[in-house]
Amino acid sequence: MTSFDQLGLIPALLDAIRERGFDTPTPIQAEMIPFLLTQERDVTGLAQTGTGKTAAFGLPILQKLDLSSRATQALVLTPTRELGIQVAREIADYGRNLPGLRTTAVYGGAPFGPQIRDLKAGPHVIIATPGRLKDLLDKGIADLSTVRFLVLDEADQMLDMGFKDELDAILATANPARQTLLFSATMPPEVARIASTYMNDPHEIVAGRKNQGTGTVSHYYYRVHSSDKYAALKRLIDVKSGMYAIIFCRTRDTVKDVANRLARDGYAADALHGELTQVQRDSVMGRFRDGNPSLLVATDVAARGLDVDDLTHVIHYDLPDEVSVYTHRSGRTGRAGKTGASLALVHMREGHRIAHIERAIGRKLEEARIPRGREICEARLMDLLTRVTDVEVNEEAIGPYLQAVRDSLLSFDREELLQRFISVEFNRFLDQYDTAPDLNPSVSPVRPDRAAGRPSSGAMVRIRLNLGRRQVAAPPQIIGLINNATNSSYIRIGRIDIHADSSELQIDAAMADRVEQALSGHVYRGTAIRVERLPDDRSSGGRRYPPTGPRRPSTGRRERSRT
């Protein structure tokens, strides 16, 4: 296995790498660092974000700088101020042991004064956004005549953001004898045009396949009815403890709606969209980088430049219009050698788009099922047990408190203690999901009354369950029980009458036997369910609810979270 010691780097840089805790270069670093140290040829690098690009170009550039000169020798262009600040921070960190190294970052949304002073001081490396650098060139402040290395980082993003004219002006102004390095996750025509116009026979280095996501990311998609999309999103979050994710939406209105609903339902979530001021944006992104909130709902434009190494998931609440955007989104997880998952919620009329994405990226997206309520409860219970068994016990610290704990628990036997221990963490998931309906659409969404073999009269039969108000049974719970027990969301249910200790309801006659067999013996909140067929006359008394008809009896409102 290649190590940084084998790449030809000087001791000052190797020490900085070791101080950052890195031992083994990523594939693009292992290929690009030796090449740039020994070659003057232009380079195009096809790689996702998070593959170590900054070190790949930054380390050889730092090694080749003439630190005795006050001339600017390297320029790195980035699409956003956030990415620019991060790149500037990394380059300064890698060059911490190089005496006299001067770097500066210039970007929009900040006063000109300090940036002008930094440029006049003669930085060896400038990291800039195209718009601000073009303004500084027009003012006669920036001087690119001595630039030996010009880096275009995430060139496709810069073009997507409308910086074509600025890039053309900067590239035409910079020292023509420079070495140009272009990095992009995809190679659309405009990026190819820049390469052909401003680069000289570039050497191509590809980390993975062109336009393909990183191999450390698993791709899944979930078919869902549009009306169930938010409820499905919550299930994906709840089934995975410790999720740290960006949830991408197509519009800022959807971002605000989803973020508000998540926050209202008790999730640590925030929104990132174009209506935020720069101060608000920096605050949101700073909190998210710190891990609180752990969920960020964002538009693609607003999330540009947000660079987080430890994301566990990217969730496509809305599929993007362009495959390249899907690639960029997915590349935000599974970074720095870690694994990640890309999850897409796909409504019933979008199935063809999955095949299009698969063809474009050369990867298979695996179809998965939205977790059912019981699966979520089981997953969270197992997570709780894992945390308990893996926790490190500090006997000395907890010793003084143990006797008081023993005394307070003397009245409980072992079984009661286990039940209460589990219930403290687990009750909220049981309350939410114990009888929650299955959100997975049936393979062929045919209404039961149109199915083959259904009585043409649309007959209904009446049944009685031994569940009522005292058992906290209401129509949503009863409907959820039937859906889960029968594994169907299309059973026609008529009038529901709720009594104190029982419920009477009308069921599609063609499905009555299936419902009776599935529910009999099923346990709901400690009550074993009994099902009784009733004569065909109207029920009386109790609290009545209108028929559900043949519609889907599940909405996001019925899954109000208590987490």
Image (spheres, rainbow, N blue to C red):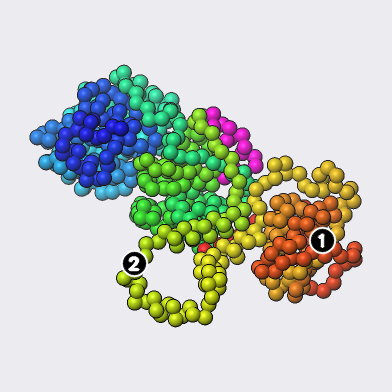
- Circle 2 packing at 10 Å, graded few (<14), some (14-19), many (20+), is few
**Above or below for 87 versus 419:** above
- Quadrant of the image containing the N terminus: top left
Q: Which residue is mark 1?
A: 506
Magenta span includes 392: no
Placement of 198 over or under 330, stated as above or below: above
Which residue is rendered at x = 46% and y = 53% of the image?
243
| Residue shown at the point (66%, 69%) measured from the top left | 526
Q: 554 and 17: which one is in front?
A: 17
How many marks overall? 2
| Place of residue 539 in the rendered image (x, y in percent of width and height, measured from the top left) | 85, 69
User: Would you say 319 lies left or right of 513 here?
Assistant: left
Residue 132: quadrant of the picture: top left
Image point (61%, 60%), residue name: 433
Q: Amino acid at mark 2?
A: Asn
User: What span is colored magenta in the figure?
Assistant: 345-359
Task: Give the main secondary structure, helix, strand or loop, of the magenta stretch.
Answer: helix
Q: Give the percent coordinates (x, y) of residue 388.
A: 45, 62
The answer to which of marks 1 and 2 sits earlier in the sequence is: 2
Direction from residue 83 to residue 491 in the image, left or right? right
**Which of the 4 quarters of the picture holds residue 84?**
top left
Residue furthest front as drawn: 414
Q: Which mark is residue 394?
A: 2
Give residue 483's quadrant in the image: bottom right
Kind of residue sitting beneath label 1: Gln
